[in-house]
Amino acid sequence: MSEVELRHLTAMAAVADEGSFGRAAARLGYTQSTVSQQIAALERAVGGAVFDRPGGPKPVRITPLGSVVLAHGRELLARAQALAAAVDRFKAGDGRIDIGTFQSVSNVILPVLVRRLRDEHPGCDIRLFEEETDQPQVDELDLMFFDGRVDGDVEHRKLLDDPYRLLARRGTFPDGPVHPAHLDGAPMVAHPPICDQARMEQALARRGARPHIVCRTAGNETVVSMVRAGMGSAILPQLALHGADIRSDPALSVHALEPALPPREIFLLWQAHRTHSPLAARAIEIATDVADHLTGQA
């Protein structure tokens, strides 16, 4: 039975449907002798005749063994057609992609990425996993956005530098850049000290500033709300402020830091030596394009 091939079953189904070897050959675009050879090979493989051949104008008749072979053969042909269609859809980008992310990327980069992927590949299946962590797990994802390099069996593509800005109640600081040393002892709303937040606070301390942290929260919107409420100022990456319409808020002001702190670096990560699906490869291209556009706006 291992010698049965899909082409044998295709020929058999055509003969059964058409009632003759000649019409089956015309349907398949083969010669009649080619169809006869396919059926002969099938009969050798299954150990018996699958058609009775009365000769003349009478149609061929399927044998009892042929009925068994044809029933299962049609199932195999249908599965093979479904497999071919699934492979074609995959190659066209209509597969599944799992992407890890964090909130700044989720708010600014991912909406554009998801919209463009869905516009290009309406049948794609996109799964997003958002987590703020120091230990990103890349092995179970196709791609992961992260604000830092990761050691181990991981490849990186740097997307952009995300500079830090000082967000404050208007009037707290004079207009224009603010020296980090002026933040020493000042009340500050901040993210939890994980990911790039810890590196930023260390850089701030090296410049002589140790703010008084009055509130830590993981939510960008909560940080902005607490600054607006007067709890203190905040140092946030530009991406966290992007799209929040901060500059039109009369209660708030945004200042550059001078000298500037090292920017947060945004990377796209994936498991090393992994073959990307067409969908993942396209996602990398789109993410790079979106990041370049944001960099051009800065």
Image (cartoon, rainbow, N blue to C red):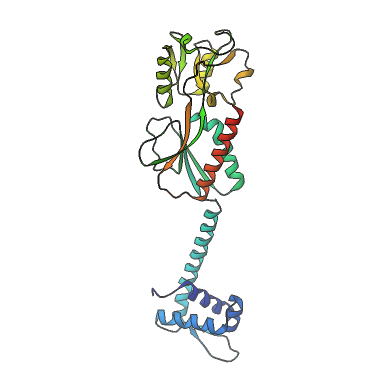
The relative height of residue 97 versus residue 296 in the rendered view (above or below) is below
| Residue 239 lies in quadrant | top right
The quadrant of the rendering that contains the N terminus is bottom left
The relative height of residue 127 versus residue 132 in the rendered view (above or below) is below
| Residue 174 lies in quadrant | top right
Viewer-side residue, 209 vs 25: 209
The relative height of residue 112 versus residue 201 in the rendered view (above or below) is below
Task: Find residue 67 and report its horizontal and vertical position in percent.
Answer: 47, 77
The relative height of residue 268 versus residue 275 in the rendered view (above or below) is above
Q: Residue furthest left?
A: 152
Residue at point 62%, 18% (across, down): 247
Residue at point 55%, 23% (across, down): 241
Task: Find residue 245 and report its horizontal and vertical position in percent.
Answer: 61, 22
Q: Residue furthest bottom?
A: 56
The quadrant of the rendering that contains the C terminus is top right
Q: How many marks?
A: 0
Residue at point 58%, 88% (across, down): 58
Residue at point 64%, 18% (across, down): 248
Q: Residue furthest front?
A: 259
Task: Find residue 114 and report its horizontal and vertical position in percent.
Answer: 56, 40
| Residue 69 lies in quadrant | bottom left
Q: Is residue 101 visible?
A: no
Q: Is residue 136 visible?
A: yes
Task: Find residue 204 and report its horizontal and vertical position in percent.
Answer: 43, 16
